[in-house]
Image (tube, grey):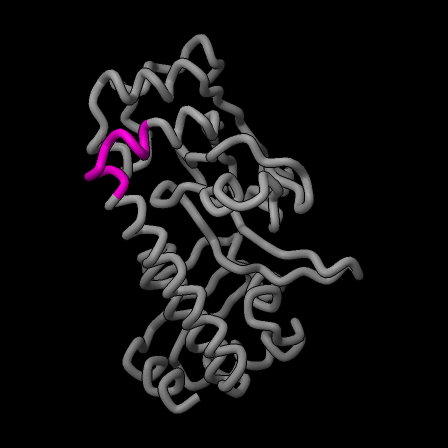
Amino acid sequence: MSDKDCKKCIDCDQRSPLFKLLSEDELNILGNVRYKVHFNPGEIIIKQGTSCHNILSIRSGFVKIYIEDGTNKIFTIKISSVDELIGKTNIFLDKRHHFSVAALTDVEVCFMDDEAFKEVLFKNQKFGELFAANWGKSNVLLWNRILTLAHKQMNGKISDLLLYLLNDVIKNEKLPAFITPKLLSEMSGVAKDNVVRTLSKFHKEKLIRFLKDEITILDIEKLEEISLKG
């Protein structure tokens, strides 16, 4: 879909649920200074270290948010879709992107001017409260993931990650093909070979079905038990 075919924000059925509290005038403030871009799987949407002057709203698809350490190693912080705005920390901090974002699937993204976004945010109290609540929820998930990485053993880390994907990202027992052992390695800090061994072990124990390009969660309660024990 080209930009000329893109509906006005007030008529768009792909806008973030966060915008449900905005009036037509407020949606127009954002819509007048936004543009839509399509990204193919694997394409870089944001590069860590570049300047930040936009809030990103995902219209469709999934992206990964990750940090690069300068040695070609990356840590994937989270996977995001239409339920979250990207860049909210950067526009209030130092106008720099402190992470990279890449498309995991075909992705449609709306880039919204940061000053227009802040105008609407400060004007609409209920929108601001919902924005803050979602920001807080995102932080809590991140803190829990950090706790997992710091204290859990390999089985606990992988169990916890599978439950995170099930409950907070995909919301389906069958994970899509882009959830690969390589991506799980980036998200868990566990070497890819060890991720494969752990998934194979879970497969033999009938906790998951792990086949080529397919991970299906079969026993949620057992994974929760493993995650809890760490």
Residue sitting at x 55%, y 51%: 65
Residue sitting at x 45%, y 43%: 88
Residue 209 seen in the figure: no
Residue 136 versus residue 61 in the image, above or below: below
Compared across the picture, whether 151 is left or right of 127 comes to: right
Residue 170 seen in the figure: yes
Query: Is residue 125 covered in magenta?
Result: yes
Spot occupied by residue 119 in the image (x, y as percentages of width and height): 36, 27
Q: Nearer the viewer, residue 147 or 168?
A: 147
Q: Which residues are magenta?
A: 120-128
Figure quadrant of residue 222: bottom left
Spot occupied by residue 165 in the image (x, y as percentages of width and height): 40, 62
Residue sitting at x 43%, y 77%: 159
Pick out the residue farthest to the right: 71
Figure quadrant of residue 27: top left
Q: Predominant secondary structure in magenta?
A: helix
